[in-house]
Amino acid sequence: MTRISSTRNVLTWLGLLLALTIPAWAALLAPGYFFGAHDAHHSVFYLVEFDAAIRDGAWWPRWGTDHAMGYGYPFWVVYAPFAYYVAEAFHLLGLGFTAAVKDTFLLAFLLSAAGMFLLVRRWWGDAAGLIAGLLYTYAPYHLVNIYVRAALAEFWAMVWFPWILLAWERLLEKPGDRRRLALAALSLAALFISHTVAMLFFTPWLVAYLLYRLLLPLAQGRLAYLPWRRAAAGERLKSRLVGVPPGVHLRGRDAGSTRRVNPAARRDAWRSDLRAVVRAAQSLLAAGLLAVGLAAIFLFPLLAEQRYIGQAVWVRNSYQVETNLIYFHQLFSTSWGFGYSVAGPDDGMSFQLGLAPLLLAVGGVGYSVRRRGQHRGLLAFFLLTTVIIAGMMLAPAAAVWQWLPLGDLIQFPWRLLTLTALALAIMGGASVQILAVAIGDERRDVDHAPAAATNRRPAVFALALFIIIASAAFLQPQWTPITARDESPLAIMDFEMEHPDMIGVMQGTQQPFEETPLLAQYLAGEPLQKAAIIEGAGTVTMLAHGARSGRLRVDAATPVQLVYYTYNFPGWTLTANGRPLEIITRPPYGLIGFELPAGTHLVTLRMGTTPARRAGDIVSGLSLLIVVLLLWRRRK
């Protein structure tokens, strides 16, 4: 098959896959939104805050000005923003806030399916890629993440999982390829700036996967996926070990003599293989470090400045790991609901692995058990990690979570269903090989056997239909109309009045609160009076208030002490008549305080940079330059 016809064939299968995903995202084309979903209001008002920061000049936002009932919150310091850059792009193109979020979900559907298709087709052909892409798209937890939870950032994390595996698999095949190294780094960095929690559990899983891919072939004495250990290298190795010239194939009793291998030569060959593994590991490590460098703009401030945030609110009560562990039967229960995760087995939402993913994964693993080769080991890894991850989500694993570093930051152990959806989709894709066995053509893949592909297409389409029908009941969200209030800061006020225990606080906040001096102004639709004199005589006039800045005039008849109704946090700077002012953290809420002498003062507040942010900007800029150079190098 020529390169052009092969590309056309791939695009045909990919187009078919994307068409078959339409039932999954068709609901997004309807008017309205599913504001009853857990984080649906968040997904929209986060974009409202993000857009306000962008329009106030923050190309990489750090501060959400309307959170905490107007005190603001360093939301984008701890919350990975990638999905909201995508949504902001749709909004700047003219879509409303909610429509932009819906289109961002839709794009994630398409990209995740395409990534899974391109990954799995490398191993088992286009038909397998199509089935894997559908399994991933219609995985119950994938649908929970959008229609039950409306978790936009986590939904985008699932986009990157197959793309990361694809990029790093390609780097494993050719560790010396600088373009592949750059793409591997970009894919992992995309995850890092998409979802903080997914970064915490996917990265160790990826490290385990890469170690498995490196060390298992070494233990088996074959490094078939490395470029310096392909067929030609195998011939040279045979010559060294048993004295058979390259290209000569022995038969009969002569072939048996190849078992008499010189032990010293075998040790030399193993050392040579080990050096090859080390060289490959060096390329993987370089890609990982480059990924961290690309994401430094987010990671450095996250690590350095999270200590100033009151974190207890995000790891207690409904966010506590022990409260959100599930039970074994829930992995197989077909029940569906739009409720919440609660302590005990009576959760209002589904944690099922899914009928179609389970059945087809069993078929894929069953096929691999009777076959040898690297794909058998590959499926063994996905099966093993699926079992381990499923066990980690269950109630008996509570002690393990207490032992794990940063385990409490995961909040919901059932988030690991993102990984089981990935693994089951890959194993399910392998089940297509059973069809090849059935038609007696198991050694031919779709790319190089059009006739075989044609013979198995009816069965593949039947599997595709089965996958869609198995999840059909999960494709309808709970629709609600979109109002202007939903797309304004008032949505934040509504949420925080209903859930005061979820109001973000600073480390310096000494007591919780359920209202602020700004709340009544928000509810009345009045211009916000962000500053007030708390000691002395004078007047304060607000001149401007933005998402990361504010200007006011103070006419002080006497020396005055003022409070600016915003949390004090690293990066804030105050000037009066162009001269820096000292910021005083005022108890009990940790707000910005300052003092002025008598007279008229033009005061400016601005969210600036910090050493961690400056370092992150520089490292990410240099890393991006490295990536550009790697991608633009001339082909040899």
Image (cartoon, helix red, strand yellow):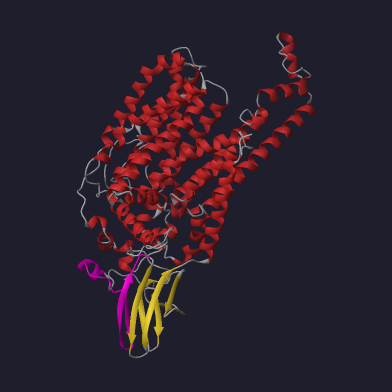
| Residues rendered magenta in the picture | 519-547
Task: Report the front residue among 404 and 623.
Answer: 623
User: What residue do we see at 64% from left, 30% from top?
Assistant: 227
As drawn, is 268 to the left or to the right of 475?
A: right
298 falls in the magenta region: no
Instruction: State the image coordinates of residue 455 (x, y, percent, origin top left).
Output: 41, 14
Number of numbered discs present? 0
**321 shown above or below 133:** below
Q: Is residue 610 above or below residue 187?
A: below
Residue in view at x 40 percent, y 31 percent: 133
Q: Is residue 191 left or right of residue 491?
A: right
523 magenta-colored: yes
Residue 474's spot in the image, x, y percent?
28, 37
Asked whether 96 or 303 is in front, the reply is: 96
Q: Is residue 137 visible?
A: yes
- Taking the spot 48% from the left edge, 56% from the top edge, the residue there is 298
Quarter occupied by residue 604: bottom left
Relative to 600, residue 72 above or below = above
